[in-house]
Image: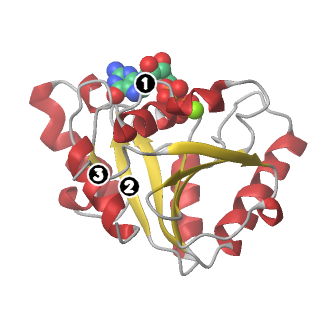
Amino acid sequence: MAQPLHDARFVTSASNVMQLGTCHAEVAFVGRSNVGKSSLLNALANQAQLARVSKTPGRTRLINVFVTGPDRWIVDLPGYGYASGPKDESKAWQTMIEGYLLGRKTLRMVFVLVDAEIGPTKLDHQMVSWLQTTDLSYRIVATKADQVKPSRQLAQRRDIATSLGLQAADIAWVSSQKGLGIQDLRKDIASCLDL
Ligand SMILES: Nc1nc2c(ncn2[C@@H]2O[C@H](COP(=O)(O)OP(=O)(O)O)[C@@H](O)[C@H]2O)c(=O)[nH]1
Ligand SMILES: [Mg+2]
């Protein structure tokens, strides 16, 4: 059988949760802009250009929906932490993200991407703290793991986990560039989606 997620394709972009239709089950990706979200989607789907659309100006601030398998969605949420972003914009972002995260009964898991070398930023901590106030399930994914020196990988993974109140094994440790951890994460997502 073909690998799960390899059939993923872009469906639509939306600026508001109300614009989205229904699906059987979905998972969402959230994280700081530039954390490697698009690259991770491409690696999971084994398609070089899948998430290219989200780089198109205008679409970076939208909810991007990809479909995989029968009526399963992977939802790419706009990145946070544009340092120069005006206040109104971050407020609008917050409304959009919270509207989506709290408005989808079919949402099975929120994957929070954190840069493996930089570790969780203040905004990452805020996102996790907010998720803890909801009923949502979430999982931390440390990206760009190839940027961490091999000799520091174990300690860095443990430190990131600890700072978020987790064990090292609780967080996914991936490199889209090197393919590290991609197959395990793909399986994890497939299982969240009953694929
Ligand atoms: N070294 C390394 N760089 C990566 C990796 N994934 C993404 N990047 C780089 O990080 C930058 C941002 O990636 P992108 O996927 O566009 O991030 P997004 O803004 O979160 O969608 C790009 O220059 C990528 O080439 C990775 O696994 N390893
Ligand atoms: Mg992107």
CB atoms of marks 3 and 1 within 8 Å? no
Q: What residue is shown with label 1? A: 48
Q: Nearer the viewer, residue 193 or 114?
A: 193
Marks 3 and 2 close (CB-CB < 8 Å): no
| Res 34 visible | no
What's under tag 1, amino acid-wise?
Ala
Check the image and report above or below for 40 versus 137.
above
Q: Is residue 3 left or right of residue 126?
A: left
Q: Which of labels 3 and 1 is toward the front? A: 1
Q: Earlier in the sequence, mark 3 or mark 2?
A: 2
Percent x, y of residue 34? 54, 29
Asked whether the viewer can see residue 95, the reply is yes
Residue 126, image x, y percentages: 58, 57
Instruction: Name the residue tied to disc 3.
Output: 185
Q: Separation of disc 3 and disc 2 at Cα?
A: 11 Å
Mark toward the start of the polypeptide (3 vs 1): 1
* Residue 159, position as x, y percentages in the image: 26, 48
**Residue 127 place in picture, x, y as percent:** 57, 58
